[in-house]
Image (cartoon, grey):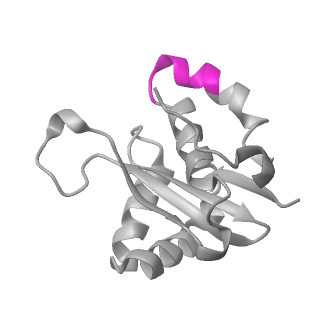
Amino acid sequence: MTNYCILKIQEHGELAEQAAEWFHSKWGIPKVAYLESINMCLEKKTAVPQWYAVMDGERIIAGCGVIENDFHDRKDLTPNVCAVYVEEDCRNQGIAGRLLQFIRQNSYGADARQQNEQAKHERCHFSHEQYTSWIPLP
């Protein structure tokens, strides 16, 4: 059974360079663009942007971001989930669904602080066997 850990990069600044390089390698967007957004996240001045990494030990196996705008002009559709990626050898285990569920549970606003405390103990070491089906989002 494999255990993974979902990390908010905002709480793990030591992952900034590794995550920026990882996202760059997956999407071809310049590393500096990811690093700039991740650094904004680390400043903790606003709820967006946020970046997440799913770790298998020291290896990033999945990740995504939450940004204000993802290449569209619809301000009413803010924030946007972006750059969702799961390594090919880790697919079909429900990792992306679990990551999106985690983001939804750690949404922004007053309720997020309460949910955040509850989610802290849930975010690490989920077994891929627990998440083998799609997790519906309301």
- Relative to 122, 91 lies left or right: left
Residue at x 59%, y 75% (from the top left corner):
88
Percent of width and height locating residue 59: 71, 73
Residue 99 visible in the current orientation: yes
The number of callouts visible is: 0
Percent of width and height locating residue 103: 53, 40
**Camera-side residue of 111 and 14:** 111
| Stretch in magenta | 108-115
| Placement of 16 over or under 30, stated as above or below | above
Q: Residue furthest right?
A: 1
Residue 127 visible in the current orientation: no
Q: Quadrant of residue 70?
A: bottom left
The quarter of the picture where the C terminus appears is top left
Residue at x 40%, y 78% (from the top left corner):
31
Q: Quadrant of residue 36?
A: bottom left
Q: Residue furthest left?
A: 73
Q: Quadrant of residue 117?
A: top right
Residue at x 53%, y 18% (from the top left corner):
111
| Placement of 105 over or under 40, stated as above or below | above
- Relative to 130, 26 lies left or right: left
The quarter of the picture where the N terminus appears is bottom right
Q: Is residue 118 magenta?
A: no
Q: Is residue 113 magenta?
A: yes
- Relative to 114, 72 lies left or right: left
Percent of width and height locating residue 113: 59, 24
- Relative to 130, 65 lies left or right: left
User: What predominant SS class does the magenta segment belong to?
Assistant: helix
Percent of width and height locating residue 124: 77, 47
